[in-house]
């Protein structure tokens, strides 16, 4: 694989918090033996995008619109774990504060989050 040099225009504390939340959620909601995907790409607008993809057992397409609502959790997820439904809401708020976007998409049984903003991705030689 080719490594890339990445630069991003972002607040490092907010960026760390956003990525930490996305990675923590992916780990916590992926069953043992499941797969988490992490990607980095240049955007069509000349920026940088980080994607995190994990299994989405029990999520319906209508749920995706609510993922960033404060305190929202899928009913099945309320029975255990330490999540209270604030992480994704805060992550989106932080992304917006930096001039970035945080979106979610459900594709089959996989849930993907994309964090995109100003920056640059270049292949290393």
Image (cartoon, grey):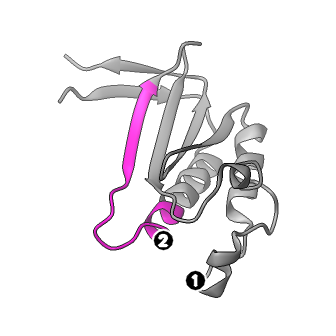
The quarter of the image holding the C terminus is top left
Q: Earlier in the sequence, mark 1 or mark 2?
A: 2
> Which residue bears the numbered disc 2?
28
Whether tag 1 and tag 2 are in contact, CB under 8 A, the answer is yes
> Which residue bears the numbered disc 1?
81
The quarter of the image holding the N terminus is top left
**What residue do we see at 52% from left, 19% from top?**
43
Mark 1: give few (<14), some (14-19) or many (20+) Cα within 10 Å. few
Q: Say if the magenta span includes residue 36.
A: yes
Q: Is residue 83 visible?
A: no
Q: Position of residue 37 (x, y in %)?
A: 37, 48
Asked whether, in this view, residue 34 is left or right of residue 11, the answer is: left
Q: Position of residue 6 (x, y in %)?
A: 41, 28
**What residue do we see at 60% from left, 56% from top?**
17
> Which stretch appears magenta?
24-41
Relative to 33, say whether 120 is above or below.
Answer: above
Q: Nearer the viewer, residue 117 or 102?
A: 102
């Amino acid at each position: 694989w080719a490594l890339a040099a990445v630069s991003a225009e972002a607040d490092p504390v907010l960026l760390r918090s956003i990525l930490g939340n996305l990675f923590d959620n992916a780990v916590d909601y992926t069953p043992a033996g499941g797969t988490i995907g992490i990607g980095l790409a240049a955007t069509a607008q000349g920026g940088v995008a980080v994607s995190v993809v994990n299994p989405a057992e029990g999520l319906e397409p209508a749920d995706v619109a609510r993922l960033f609502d404060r305190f929202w959790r899928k009913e099945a997820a309320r029975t255990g774990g330490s999540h209270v439904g604030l992480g994704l809401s805060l992550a989106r708020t932080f992304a917006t504060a930096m001039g970035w976007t945080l979106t979610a998409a459900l594709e089959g049984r996989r849930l993907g989050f994309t964090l995109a903003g100003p920056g640059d991705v270049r292949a290393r030689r």
